[in-house]
Image: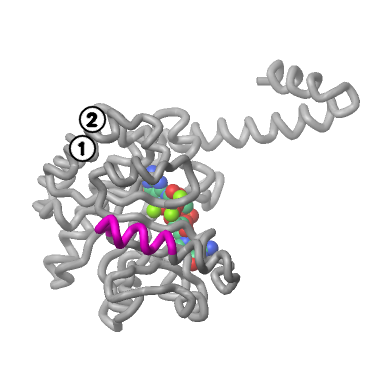
């Protein structure tokens, strides 16, 4: 690694040598440390799932939740999934981590159903590497069977990047469909996406990325997000608008009775016990 950072530093010019070499070393060390600590994370019981409600934007009724992974490491402290998930993908550790997430989310959903929280749907994020791994379908089936959870209460969120491997992805999506698991395209509109491919994908929902509603008061942004909502509705997809923080944002969205939303306005992701309280008061 020292060699590599020196090489990169030199290619940027001699004067920057010190700067680049130390910055790169620091970043590499952090990555290696995360990679190393991740190896023990499941065994050490470092992970938890938080849950963020998905609400019907018209009625404000909670219709489901998204499971979001949290990692608290004894040496590194709290590390954001935005930082450790890409590293886990890189190393392949995401397969074991993703399996833990699926099983934990299904177990929680079943517990909630037993407690009378019926008709809610649990969404789980699945990264491309995990999605395209040969064990994926079996892992999903096992998570459902072990917890006696009906497949229709589980939804898998994947990003548009699965479309780069369209043949495999179509096959996997169809397998999920045949099991009865719902599928959703996360961060919709930010990645490589062809609308003609979207038409052919056997998916159930799109989640419109937060960036489309950040400035929704702006005329162009408003047109854009409402056009995307329209496309989703016309393709018979469930539409979820992500990252809604202010009441004012909702008023710019052309919503009907089946548009869903998620964001700090309704609730941040919270531990299971807090989700229960929010749901009871909804
Ligand atoms: P995502 O799936 O798009 O999840 C939405 C992210 O936006 C979450 O961040 C959530 O906490 C945050 N968020 C929700 N509402 C708002 C809002 O109103 N304002 C703002 N500023 N943020 C909001 P988080 O939990 O840090 O997760 C980041 C990303 O990490 C996720 O994006 C997802 O791609 C990935 N991730 C999280 N958990 C898992 C997991 O279990 N497996 C995999 N493969 N990826 C995960
Ligand atoms: Mg998601
Ligand atoms: Mg998202
Ligand atoms: Mg994301």
Q: Which mark is residue 135?
A: 2
Whether residue 129 can be seen here: yes
Q: Are marks 1 and 2 in contact (CB under 8 Å)?
A: yes
**Number of numbered discs on residues:** 2
Q: Is residue 111 above or below residue 22?
A: below
Q: Residue furthest bottom?
A: 281
Which numbered marker is on residue 54?
none
Judge whether residue 171 is colored magenta. no
Residue 239 screen position, x and y as percent = 33, 62
Residue 233 shown in magenta: yes
- Residue furthest to the right in view is 15
Range of magenta residues? 227-237
Which picture quadrant has residue 43? top left
- Judged by its main secondary structure, the magenta piece is helix
Q: Quadrant of residue 13?
A: top right
Of residues 78 and 213, the one nearer the viewer is 213
Left or right: 11 in relation to 68: right
x and y, in percent, of residue 69 in the image: 39, 52
Tag on residue 139?
1
Of the 4 image quadrants, the one containing the N terminus is top right
């Amino acid at each position: 690694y020292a060699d590599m950072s020196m090489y990169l530093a030199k290619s940027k010019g001699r004067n920057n040598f010190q700067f680049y070499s130390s910055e790169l070393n620091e970043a590499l060390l952090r990555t290696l440390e995360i990679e190393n600590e991740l190896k023990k994370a499941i065994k050490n019981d470092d992970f938890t799932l938080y849950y963020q409600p998905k609400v019907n934007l018209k009625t404000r009724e909670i219709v489901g939740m998204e499971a979001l992974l949290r990692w608290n490491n004894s040496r590194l402290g709290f590390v954001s999934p935005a930082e450790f998930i890409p590293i886990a993908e890189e190393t392949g550790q995401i397969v074991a981590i993703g399996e833990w997430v699926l099983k934990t989310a299904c177990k929680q959903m079943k517990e909630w159903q037993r407690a009378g929280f019926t008709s809610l749907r649990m969404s789980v994020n699945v990264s491309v590497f995990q999605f395209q791994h040969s064990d994926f379908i079996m892992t999903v089936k096992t998570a459902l069977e072990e917890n006696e959870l009906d497949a229709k209460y589980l939804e898998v969120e994947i990003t548009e990047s699965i479309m780069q491997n369209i043949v495999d992805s179509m096959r996997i999506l169809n397998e999920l469909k045949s099991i009865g698991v719902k599928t959703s395209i996360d961060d919709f509109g930010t990645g490589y996406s062809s609308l003609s491919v979207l038409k052919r994908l056997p998916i159930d929902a799109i989640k419109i990325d937060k960036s489309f509603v950040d400035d929704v008061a702006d005329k162009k942004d408003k047109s854009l997000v409402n056009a995307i909502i329209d496309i989703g509705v016309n393709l018979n997809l469930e539409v979820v608008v992500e990252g809604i923080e202010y009441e004012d944002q909702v008023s710019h969205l052309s919503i009907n009775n089946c548009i869903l939303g998620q964001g700090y306005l309704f609730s941040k992701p919270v531990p299971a016990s807090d989700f229960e309280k929010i749901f009871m008061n909804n």
